[in-house]
Image (cartoon, rainbow, N blue to C red):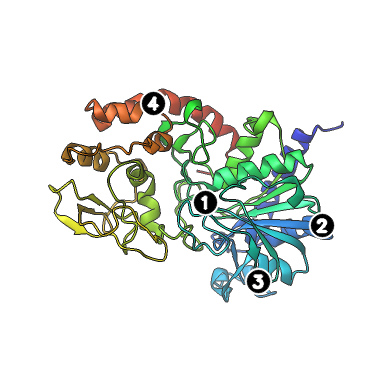
Amino acid sequence: MILSFKNKTLVFILLIYFGSLILIKSQGNCEDCFLTGAERSELYLPLLTNKNIAVVTNQTGVVRDFPESYYEMMKDPKVDCVKQATQNISIVDFLVRKNIKIKKIFAPEHGFRGTADAGEHVKNGIDTKTGLPIVSLYGDNKKPKSEYLKDVDIILFDIQDVGVRFYTYISTLSYIMEAAAENNIEVIVLDRPNPHDGYTDGPMMKNQWKSFIGLHNVPVVYGLTIGEYGKMANGEKWLKNGIQAKYTLIPMLNYHKKKRYGVSDRPSPNLPNDKSINLYPSLCFFEGTQVSVGRGTDLPFQIYGSPWTKNFKYQFTPKPTEGAKDPFLNGKLCYGENLSQYPEDLRQLNLEWLLTSYKNYKNPDQDFFLKNLFFDKLAGSDELRKQIIAGKSENEIKQSWKSDLEQFEKIRQKYIIYPN
């Protein structure tokens, strides 16, 4: 029987998945050893050999540097196999060591080393360590041009995402897949954990408000790893003109969607730790308002406040930092709340912080929402803003999302490859 490309891809994924189960069984009692897709080099190095590779990555694309005897060690139940890693090294450095022919590095928002501000123009350049050319995928060149792909056989994607619609790495992956499909190039994604996996929440993106911070009709929290998300975008024909990429996912080993894993490195300058990442889906709505989320402080996305919400007791003043060269409300005393010690591991959006700030906002000269209505782009439509203005409760707002979330769940379930 001749398999279609779609069926061949499905068979390949199933073979990798069941091969993972066999590998687990062959590793003695080390059933809890967790590996990212990047650390499963035995699955993808054979696919890269004698090919010209472009790597899409940043500072989060690292592998634990295991000794050559690692897999033998895993068979010994007395050995903590994960602790055998000596250090983290860049996926680029790892591939160079393995004599893989890398032609260029594509860098997303925040750059290859992850130091650029949100929205800051990232320039092309040269990686000083390897001498490889770096091509920016942010600013005016979010989608690779054909001229950058002429000498490329495979695009390898390895970036730590945070599982939130308006975090731009899923948009970068989508544009990579479009460009690859248009130029008959394969995309291989090395999967990584989603810090917000295993649940969905938030308003749905509507067509009128689509942008780089929301390309597809998904909720704010979509409950898929970045590898699963790429499968969904491909399978649902969400890429431009319904084109589909030749797409291979290298899955993680011993990953569970409702278990939480620490990230390899901060995904961007203002998400410095697990607490900020956990609060990010709830607090990022403030980016479309007159309220600071702590950019320009030691606690970005762990505090919020404004000069015009004086009923709050906590105070802070944003100032220029490495990750926020000109922070919002720079130099102004803000009144708000410190959530850095918030005890819960949130598995849903918290709207009370947003609603309470709106009710306490007192400024006759400026509306709570920014005039450019960036808030609507974050929310995916103007509905949430209108609900807040109308005085709707958190429960009423969340009830209005229910139907869309149920419909999305039917799509999401088709692309889940890991146990819950």
Mark before the other along the chain sequence, 4 or 2: 2
Amino acid type, label 1: Asp
Give x and y (percent) for residue 367: 25, 36
Splitting the image into 4 quarters, where does residue 380 fall?
Answer: top left
Give x and y (percent) for residue 360: 16, 40
Q: Are marks 4 and 2 in contact (CB under 8 Å)?
A: no
Mark before the other along the chain sequence, 3 or 2: 2
As drawn, the label of residue 51 is: 2
Q: Are marks 1 and 4 in contact (CB under 8 Å)?
A: no
State the residue in front, 58 or 62: 58
Amino acid type, label 3: Tyr
Q: Are marks 3 and 2 in contact (CB under 8 Å)?
A: no
Residue shown at 51% from the left, 49% from the top = 256
* SS at circle 4: helix
> Is disc 1 surrounded by few (<14), some (14 to 19) or many (20+) residues within 10 Å?
many
Which dot, 1 or 3, sits closer to the camera? 1
User: Which residue is label 1 attached to?
Assistant: 161
Mark before the other along the chain sequence, 1 or 3: 3
Q: Could you tell me how far apart the alpha carbons at marks 3 and 2 are, in whole angstroms?
A: 26 Å
Question: In this rendering, would 374 be left or right of 207?
Answer: left
> Is disc 4 surrounded by few (<14), some (14 to 19) or many (20+) residues within 10 Å?
some
Mark before the other along the chain sequence, 4 or 3: 3
Image label count: 4
State the residue in front, 331 or 318: 331
Is residue 418 among the parts visible in the rendering? no
Splitting the image into 4 quarters, where does residue 124 fall?
Answer: bottom right
Residue shown at 44% from the left, 25% from the top = 404
Question: In this rendering, would 52 be left or right of 407?
Answer: right
> Is disc 2 surrounded by few (<14), some (14 to 19) or many (20+) residues within 10 Å?
some
Is residue 180 among the parts visible in the rendering? yes
